[in-house]
Every structure is written in structure tokens, then in C-alpha cells.
Image (tube, rainbow, N blue to C red):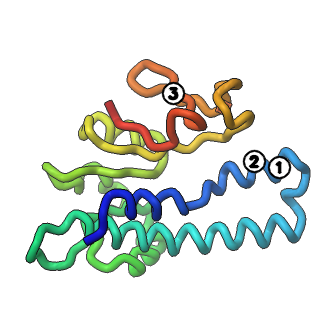
Amino acid sequence: MLRTGQVFAIAMAVTSIPVISRIMFDLGILGTSFARVVLGVAVVEDIVLYVVLAIALGIATQGPGASFGLPAVLGFRSERHAEAAALLPGAEIAIEPTLVTELIPPGRDVLACGPEPMLQAVADMCPGAQLAWEAPMACGYGACYGCAVEIGGELKRLCVEGPVLLAA
Ligand code: FES
């Protein structure tokens, strides 16, 4: 049985592509072949790790004797984009205009990542949800507020307080 620490370790291994991109942009190396290789590897690694993370969460949330299943709900803009969901059999799929928030099962622990409006909607529905926010980071140690997001009327610096924050 996977423990919370193992799931957390897998989640921490996921790269932050926006941060890497911003650093390369600031260094003026974003258009180089080095940057393309690094970002390409980061994208592939993230896809694999998100699948592994979803499977790990599925295993970690199963009770003794329960059949294997994944509690993932994935949202896509079109049928074509939803083809990526084949990597995660058993996941619930929402395609616009259906919203991911319409498919969140009641009474489950919720971990969400995605666009900010979706995270706000999940926060409104599930106050105990853990939300992975993304924002460009400049200083990386809490001084500039460049990475701040407003949550519940309060500014949270993702570099030192996040990037995963409780909804409420
Ligand atoms: S990046 Fe400067 S406060 Fe977070």
C-alpha cells in the first residue's frame, strides 16, 4: 500500500515547466537547442509522472479488498484533446461544455491542478481540496510577490507557501 509520503514524493518529482521556461527566458537562452531539449524532456517527464501520480493516488485511496480503480477526473476542450486520456484508463472524462467540477464525486479527497478559474470553482465546491497553483516566479524566495495568487481574499506567495495550497 502506498503511503502519503510516497505519493507526495511522486508529486514533487513533477517539473514546473513555467518556472523553467521563465528562467531560460530571463537568461536569454529560451530559443536555443539546449532549452528545447530541456523543455522537451520536462514535458515527457511530466506526462509520465502525472500518469504515475494518478495511479499512485488510485492505489493509495483504495480500501482493503476494493477493486482497482482511479479516482481521476480529467477535463478537455475537445474530443481530440481527450485522446490523451487513453493514458489513464478508468478516469472520468469531461469535455466542454461539461465541467470537471460537475463530475467530482462527493465525499472524496480532492487534489486538483489546472487553470485558475477551474481551481477557484473546485475551491468553492470542496473547501478541503488541495490545489496546485501555477504562476511565474521571479525571486523564488518570497520577496517580490511576483508569484502571488489571491485565495480567499488573501495573497499567497506560491514560491514559499505553495505551490499546493488548501482551498480554504
Ligand atoms: S517568486 Fe518572488 S515572492 Fe515568489
Sort mark 1 into few (<14), some (14-19) or many (20+) by Cα contacts within 10 Å: few
Left/right placement of residue 111 relative to residue 41 reads: left
Which percent across, then down, holds residue 144?
Answer: 70, 25
Residue mark closest to the camera, 1 vs 3:
3
Residue named by callout 1: 25
Quadrant containing the N terminus is: bottom left
Which percent across, then down, holds residue 3?
Answer: 30, 63
Q: Secondary structure at mark 3?
A: strand
Residue, x 14% and y 50% (percent of image)? Answer: 106
Q: Is residue 137 above or below residue 90?
A: above
Q: Amino acid at mark 1?
A: Phe
Residue named by callout 3: 156
Q: Amino acid at mark 3?
A: Lys
Residue, x 51% and y 33% (percent of image)? Answer: 161
Ligand 1 lies in quarter:
top right
If you read the primary sequence from the N terminus, does the residue marked by circle 3 or circle 2 appear first? 2
Residue mark closest to the camera, 3 vs 2:
3
Label 3 – label 2 distance at C-alpha: 20 Å
